[in-house]
Image (cartoon, coloured by chain):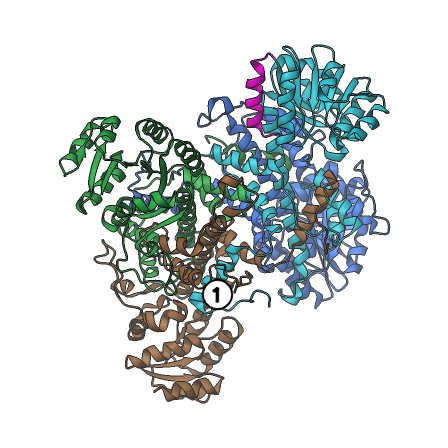
Chain colours: A green, B brown, C cyan, D blue
Amino acid sequence: MQLGIVGLGRMGGNIARRLTKAGHACVVWDRNEGAVNELASEGNTGASDLAGLVKALDAPRVVWVMLPSGAPTEATISELGTLLSAGDIIIDGGNSFYKDDIRRAASLKEKGISYIDVGTSGGVWGLERGYCMMIGGDKAAVDHVDPILATLAPGLGDIPRTPGRDGRDPRVEQGYMHCGPAGSGHFVKMVHNGVEYGLMQAYAEGFDILKHKDSTELPENERFSLDMADIAEVWRRGSVVSSWLLDLSAIALAQNETLSNFSGEVADSGEGRWTVMAAVEEAVSAEVLSAALYSRFRSRQDHTFGEKLLSAMRFQFGGHVEKKSGS
Amino acid sequence: MQLGIVGLGRMGGNIARRLTKAGHACVVWDRNEGAVNELASEGNTGASDLAGLVKALDAPRVVWVMLPSGAPTEATISELGTLLSAGDIIIDGGNSFYKDDIRRAASLKEKGISYIDVGTSGGVWGLERGYCMMIGGDKAAVDHVDPILATLAPGLGDIPRTPGRDGRDPRVEQGYMHCGPAGSGHFVKMVHNGVEYGLMQAYAEGFDILKHKDSTELPENERFSLDMADIAEVWRRGSVVSSWLLDLSAIALAQNETLSNFSGEVADSGEGRWTVMAAVEEAVSAEVLSAALYSRFRSRQDHTFGEKLLSAMRFQFGGHVEKKSGS
Amino acid sequence: MQLGIVGLGRMGGNIARRLTKAGHACVVWDRNEGAVNELASEGNTGASDLAGLVKALDAPRVVWVMLPSGAPTEATISELGTLLSAGDIIIDGGNSFYKDDIRRAASLKEKGISYIDVGTSGGVWGLERGYCMMIGGDKAAVDHVDPILATLAPGLGDIPRTPGRDGRDPRVEQGYMHCGPAGSGHFVKMVHNGVEYGLMQAYAEGFDILKHKDSTELPENERFSLDMADIAEVWRRGSVVSSWLLDLSAIALAQNETLSNFSGEVADSGEGRWTVMAAVEEAVSAEVLSAALYSRFRSRQDHTFGEKLLSAMRFQFGGHVEKKSGS
Amino acid sequence: MQLGIVGLGRMGGNIARRLTKAGHACVVWDRNEGAVNELASEGNTGASDLAGLVKALDAPRVVWVMLPSGAPTEATISELGTLLSAGDIIIDGGNSFYKDDIRRAASLKEKGISYIDVGTSGGVWGLERGYCMMIGGDKAAVDHVDPILATLAPGLGDIPRTPGRDGRDPRVEQGYMHCGPAGSGHFVKMVHNGVEYGLMQAYAEGFDILKHKDSTELPENERFSLDMADIAEVWRRGSVVSSWLLDLSAIALAQNETLSNFSGEVADSGEGRWTVMAAVEEAVSAEVLSAALYSRFRSRQDHTFGEKLLSAMRFQFGGHVEKKSGS
């Protein structure tokens, strides 16, 4: 089927490629003309602006917005709201905050425009592996764009099937799920990322404990010098902790066992933060997901004011003189 | 090759079966005579006591102890120390604390007996999938028992190979690893279990947040009623959080989406606790692994004394009257 | 000076009493007529509605709103915005979210009305001890109401003076502080409550560890049966952990050492949650304040869905059968 | 009464001074001859070695050991065990691990020597304020040394008495407590320090959140530039979070509001670690006390291996290139 795509970065461009390859017709636009030309040379129709993209589509139009969350996505969807007509569909495939989805869907509904939010996982591997998609929106709209979703999804592949799923929605096994009304797709994707932080931190702490087993603070006969790359590899093979993140860790450690090519300053994105806030709003205890987020915050600090206050208190009550700043 | 096996529970019995099937000769003993007879009927040689098992083996003897950690393992290894001779090998395949391994290995070394500790992951799936093994001990002894380890290991299977491992120990890709001296095998397995706790808790918290998204405490237009079984399934397919533990979660949720067949009182075993203690000894921050352990502790409590103290303080400073006990 | 007070609950009523006693003239109103009459009988002027309260005040009018945060406060301040005139001052003494203060102050400023937010700590002890106040708003307005703030504050009392404060704002030593623009008072009070949660949880965990030192899971010669009330008392006297919260704990434990009169279900209010959210917004690691909040969430749950998922995974990979629901 | 004191560092020396001032007779020894001479010049009897100290005492002898925990304390108590006789008493006033106390007490009991462990809080302020003491040992021995304990304790002072303590052990209000058998004194002191870590971290996080409220990552109208020294001061006055640690924070912040004289690398001692291990042994959830300890561990690291692993995973799945090491 026909689809407009706005935003031709790594994700948007690869989505266009995966769709075109499967016979769908993509009309593409990006503020970066070079990206448009590149995709046009690969069999897509390039547009020169957003209005042009809308014009090039047949009604009911479907436009997939694949832009950085926040202002860029907001502005584009707002403008699309004025360019599109009743019956058309906007898909936000980025990483929007789900409350923004709820607000946008309600506002667009007044004009008869449907809004679908698609949380997409798979990263740079998606072009090849397919994208795991969590989708929110009205049933009719989601059903209408099913051919696109089915193409983007990874499909059954060689992943073993879960027993006991007979009678359940078959799309889920293909790697895409209609989660509920607008916002629910990005909500499920948000929690997915929160879980991702937790899983990553669990491995990080485990390898830290393994790595420091050669610490000279330990009794000499209790020290081991362990091979990080081999441990990651052996855990991939029959152990309880095998996972895709462990596969990736094994690749990285095989390349450079000390990981000396990384600084250890770890970025975080909105989803990890929003997951903690969602837990707080729901009064759900989320120790691990919060600790994983905080660990990233701390990784980007030198020494915190709080830590200096600890030293200051220790000096006050015990006369403990700790390492001085700059000394 | 020939192997003595002491302890024919689920793990020990399946290890004997997997070995016998591959042509190894097992002499087996267990204090439960029925278990011995069952294994004997499957082609193994049954012994009537530990001394008998030792006598039935050719020197250099190799005895695999597969008993509950703590007293049962300690007593058996101690007795084997008196029954075996210089050149023989004891393998502890259970879940011993690695400091016990270090002590035992030093003590047995004085008699010329080698001690190997094997941390084994794979649970009830091991008979079929093979066991992921983390091994500590002297090189000569570990090399001597390689035929047994190679048989028990899962092998390459259809798990994709990690690029960049050329020139590295090929056993690791087969699913078993010689980690270092005695104790290092159980140490790596211990941290493996600590990581396992962290991974499990990350999923648990994520699904808790998803589940409570229908809470009546939330604004009505921000509530979603989400399908737990489908979310677990869709995340298995192309997402960043796919793992074997997620596969198992998907199976459990497909069987019973509310998990009403579980009480939520979660047991913990030594390894999770020892991992936290190891982190403390090494001065490594292990927020997530600790939080995962504490969450299990808390799951087995009704209300803690600490929580009552919180209520008591709130009453004292604010006159807050909280739900009374028994009311 | 003259002050209007809206909301005559425990806090509002006591504020009126403390002010009247010091010679200030309070005009009071509450939707509960009985509360108005009671305060009127104690020397305050009662009003029959909000408009009447405003009419009874001389310009520039000052109205202290002391209502539950959220809808009641919002509605009253909104109505006051229509009843008051340029030059008048609204004080929100409740527990509003500081972002609401920022919004309200900006909106009222267009009408020339000043808005002051006062975060108040001291609980039921405030009438006697005075109230610790954290204040946000324009300097001119805060200075104008200084006589009221000075009366409500605890004053120097017999708390030792901190050395090195010469030349600093003397109001702070009296127990009230102009923190910055509108919202900053409630922000500082919010973090105060976040810290309060953390302090309380630190004591709670410590006493839990002391209490469980008689656990039969411990080796018999390592068990102690400790006296909780005496420990709280002795720590009050010369130890590093002495505090007002410990004083209150000692009172509660002296009354009932097992705290059997408390259920252990601990409520939380907005400030603890907002503090965690503020930390996340600022990318500040707040492990302890979050853990303290989560502990309260968990205290109000029976068994969580997440915990059941842990049990379900353990059953799947290890065949571990844990206590069944309802059994 | 007469007392031998071994170890004349800051704590031991001040204890001798406080006792001598009150009329007790101290025989003192330290491997540092200068410290012995200094105390001798202040009215104590100096000994030239441990044997000399023992000889200078009348039976039943009482020896207070005030040395660094671990090897120095262990060696001295071991030697005292050979120098003293049945009926004599050894007091360990240092920071020994309580399981060492249990072991030592049992061993000395065979010789008829009593062992008392005294956990002491109060730091450098103890000479003036008195020492809060938590005491383990047999009743008879503890009663025998009561005159010394009573002198070292702070006494009632001007700390308000807790209502409802009639009929309870009056020593507790004087600031010293007989907690139970040998080891229990150091156990209670150990948990005291664990709580201390938690309290300190709660303040540290709170002030970190306050400090970062001027972050340029926040919307401009939501930023506040707050005065740390004034906030610490105002919280001392009538608020719920007032405490001695807050008093000390206020002093430190009044001296240097940015705490630029501290590096933020925070040491930890055995008690904080042992408290976490005790919680794990008892299966008590201790999130806050653990997080406080881990925060200190992390404060002394540059970037952890675990954090580099997080970056490595992010690069693998998302192509995220984070700040490179050394760049």
User: Residue at the spot x=57%, y=25% of the render?
Assistant: D257
Numbered circles on residues, count: 1
Vertical order, A228 against C161 (above or below): below
Q: In screen coordinates, is B189 left or right of C130?
A: left
* Residue D101 image point, x, y percent: 65, 59
Q: In screen coordinates, is B77 left or right of D176?
A: left
Question: Magenta stretch mostly in which secondary structure?
Answer: helix
Magenta stretch?
Answer: C95-112
C245 drawn magenta:
no
Tag 1 residue = B97
Q: In screen coordinates, is D84 left or right of D252?
A: right
The C terminus of chain B lies in which quarter of the figure? bottom right
Q: Please name whichever residue, A54 or B4, is drawn nearer the observer in this view of the structure.
A: A54
* Residue C85 image point, x, y percent: 64, 12
The chain identifier of the residue carrying mark 1 reads B
Vertical order, B85 against C275 (above or below): below
Q: Which amino acid does label 1 sit on?
A: Phe
